[in-house]
Amino acid sequence: EVQLVESGGGLAQPGGSLSLSCAASGFTFSLYEMNWVRQAPGKGLEWISYISTTGMAKYYAESVEGRFTVSRDNTKNSLILQMNSLRVEDTGVYYCARLHFYHLDFWGQGALVTVSS
Amino acid sequence: QSALTQPPSASGSPGQSVTISCTGTSSDADGNNYVSWYQQHPGDAPKLIIFEVNKRPPGVPDRFSGSKSVNTASLTVSGLQAEDEGDYYCASNAGTISVFGTGTKVTVL
């Protein structure tokens, strides 16, 4: 059974940092590209990051470019999102999702990030 | 890239059909269409229900169907059931970057 489990969410102050992890199981993690998608409270889905199978290619939404960094450890079946210079508008639920061809076929349960002073 | 445009709401009675539009989708240079649809219930993660315009993942009822014409994709839910109530999002993916629709709240009357 494919499982994606996010962890590391919580409260951060504006300008602060948080790191999210996504533990993958039930599939060969190294063969799949991965994405991060977030959802602000009461709002829609926003794609924020992509990482290739090897981690060599990374793409970000303009809203997080230069502040967020995605990485992966294929030996530990783990996806990481390092979030720096956090803003109030970064508040929301963050989902990791597996990219299968051109669609996101499995999603984690989400991790809540709250940025507030 | 701007979000794809969806109507904010749609509704229907049990047994009826509801169709949601998604405007702004496009094909790539090879004519491939990579539109997918996701269902989200309150408090839950999104769930894939349609991919590549009109294909269903295993376990998704055939009441859900997708189509596309030029730059507008559509999701139709036939034979509405109470459990179909929720938020629906379209998405277009070009291989690396995904763009989501604005979302549609479906209410079963």
Image (tube, rainbow, N blue to C red):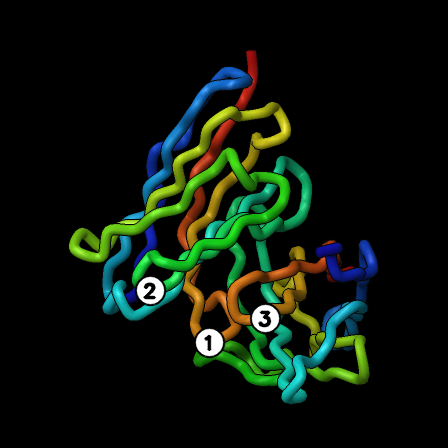
Q: Residue at x 59, y 70 (%)?
A: B94
> Looking at the image, do the residues carrying marks 2 and 1 touch, with CB atoms under 8 Å apart?
no
Q: Amino acid at mark 3?
A: Ala
Report the residue that reaches farthest toward the left.
A75
Question: Distance between the Cα atoms at labels 3 and 2?
Answer: 16 Å
**Total tally of numbered discs in the picture:** 3
**Residue beneath disc 2:** A53
Identify the amino acid type marked 1: Phe
Q: Is residue A19 above or below residue B78?
A: above
Chain on which label 2 sits:
A
Q: Is residue A42 above or below residue A88?
A: below
Q: Amino acid at mark 2?
A: Thr
Locate the N terminus of chain A and report the quarter of the image it occupies: bottom left
Residue at the location (22% across, 57% down)?
A: A74
Q: Which mark is residue B94?
A: 3
Camera-side residue of A10 and B20: A10
Q: Are marks 3 and 1 on the same chain?
A: no
x and y percentages locating residue B96 in the rendered image: 52, 64
Q: Residues within 10 Å of mark 3 (few under 14, many from 20)?
A: some
Determine whether the residue tagged by mark 1 lies in a helix, strand or loop. Answer: loop
Element assignment for label 3: loop
Position of the C terminus of chain A by quadrant: top right
* Residue sitting nearer the eye, A68 or B49: A68
Q: Left of A39 or right of it: where is A70? A: left
Q: Residues within 10 Å of mark 1 (few under 14, many from 20)?
A: some
Q: Is residue B11 left or right of residue A107?
A: right
Question: Which residue in the protein does label 1 denote?
Answer: A101
SS of the residue under disc 2: loop
Residue toward you, A60 or B10:
A60
Q: Residue at x 55, y 45 (%)?
A: A38
Q: Are marks 3 and 2 in contact (CB under 8 Å)?
A: no
Numbered circle sitting on residue B9 = none
